Amino acid sequence: MSTNLEFRKSSYSGGNGNCVEVADTPAFSAVRDTQNRELVALAYGPAEWRAFLHTAKRDLN
């Protein structure tokens, strides 16, 4: 995975310091823990990422 990804704080992160950052590319979306940026990011293909977002949005309601 490229180390030149542009990560942004997820809009779904809470204000309690438990945050994740997301970087999107045409091929995948990468997710990492803001408290452990030096560790590996998890990468998801487009279909997996859409399924994750759909489930997360549904579970927030």
Image (spheres, rainbow, N blue to C red):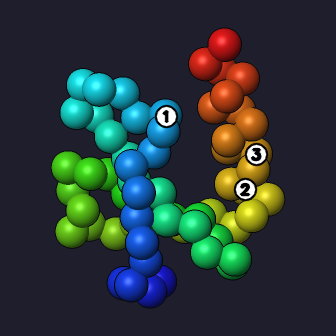
* Residue under pointer 2: 48
| Disc 3 from disc 2: Cα separation | 5 Å
Which mark, residue 12?
A: 1
- Residue at 74% across / 64% down in the picture? 46
**Residue 34 placement, left or right of 21:** left
**Residue 25 placement, left or right of 11:** right
> 40 or 10, which is in the foreground?
10
* Residue under pointer 3: 51
Mark earlier in primary sequence (1, 3): 1
Please, is residue 15 above or below residue 46 in the view? Answer: above
Tag 3's secondary structure? helix
Please, is residue 17 above or below residue 16 in the view? Answer: below
Q: Are marks 3 and 2 in contact (CB under 8 Å)?
A: yes
Front label number (1 vs 2)? 1
Front label number (1 vs 3)? 1
- Residue 38, by quadrant, is bottom left
- Residue at 71% across / 32% down in the picture? 55
Question: In the rendering, at what x and y percent does residue 18 appear?
Answer: 28, 34
Q: Quadrant of the C terminus?
A: top right
Tag 2's secondary structure? helix
| Disc 1 from disc 2: Cα separation | 17 Å
Q: Amino acid at mark 1?
A: Tyr
Question: In the rendering, at what x and y percent does residue 51 appear?
Answer: 76, 45
Q: Amino acid at mark 2?
A: Glu
Q: Amino acid at mark 3?
A: Ala
Question: In the rendering, at what x and y percent does residue 31 appear?
Answer: 46, 58
| Disc 1 from disc 3: Cα separation | 15 Å
Mark earlier in primary sequence (1, 2): 1
Tag 1's secondary structure? loop
**Mark 2 surroundings within 10 Å by alpha-carbon count, few (fewer than 14), some (14 through 19), many (20 or more):** few
- Residue at 47% across / 57% down in the picture? 22
- The residue furthest right is 47
